[in-house]
Amino acid sequence: MARKLRKFVPGVPMHVIQRGNNRCPIFFGDDDRHRYLDFLIDTSDEHDCPVHCYVLMGNHVHLLMTPMREHSLAKTMKLLNKRYVWHFNKLHERTGGLWEGRYIAKHVDTERYLRVCYQYIELNPVRAGFCKRARDHAWSSHRYHAYGEYDRVVTPHQKYLALNSGV
């Protein structure tokens, strides 16, 4: 029997974490990462769940997203995970599950937590020892937020934009 979709409060940002099963790699190369981001863009657009911040690590991902409808996040993650696993299994000639259970989703309910969440997500590769500086990790939204570089995945969050304007 399928599980019921989880409900989330529309307009409240969510910190989403999805881990590989047994903490195994979920990306074997840049093609996998590009496809994951393609699927992320398509599914978040389709279900009205914009992505504000992200990082792709070796065996997990962190996303900051805002569901605009009650089931936006659940539908986005269900379709994203389904499409990516199908791609991953076909490309790497494997079968079975890729994910370690359901994704984790935490409400980001204060402006302070929003700032902390952006930093936590984008500094994850530095803390993990992947790189010395966040800007050296190609698979995150850090360059968009720190240097204004274009990132096709990112939809700016209004509260984040207001941080610089003094509003």
Image: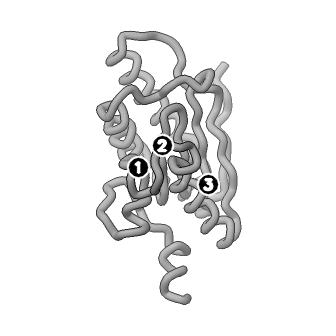
Q: Position of residue 27 (x, y in %)?
A: 42, 29
Residue at figure coordinates x 54%, y 55% from the top left = 123
- Which image quadrant for residue 10? bottom right
Q: Which residue is mark 2?
A: 130
**Residue visible at 70% across and 65% down in the picture:** 109
The nearer-to-camera label among 3 and 2 is 2
Q: The disc labelled 3 sits on which kind of residue?
A: Met
| For marks 3 and 2 on the same chain, the one whose residue lies earlier in the sequence | 3
What residue is drawn where x is 67% and y is 18%? 1
Kindly identify which numbered label has been placed on residue 86. Answer: none
Report if residue 25 is visible in the image: yes
**Disc 3 marks which residue?**
14
Answer with left or right where residue 122 lies relative to residue 84: right
Q: Residue furthest bottom?
A: 166
Residue for point 42% across, 10% down: 94
Q: Is the C-beta separation of discs 1 and 2 under 8 Å?
A: yes
Can residue 50 be seen at all in this image of the molecule?
A: no
Q: How many marks?
A: 3
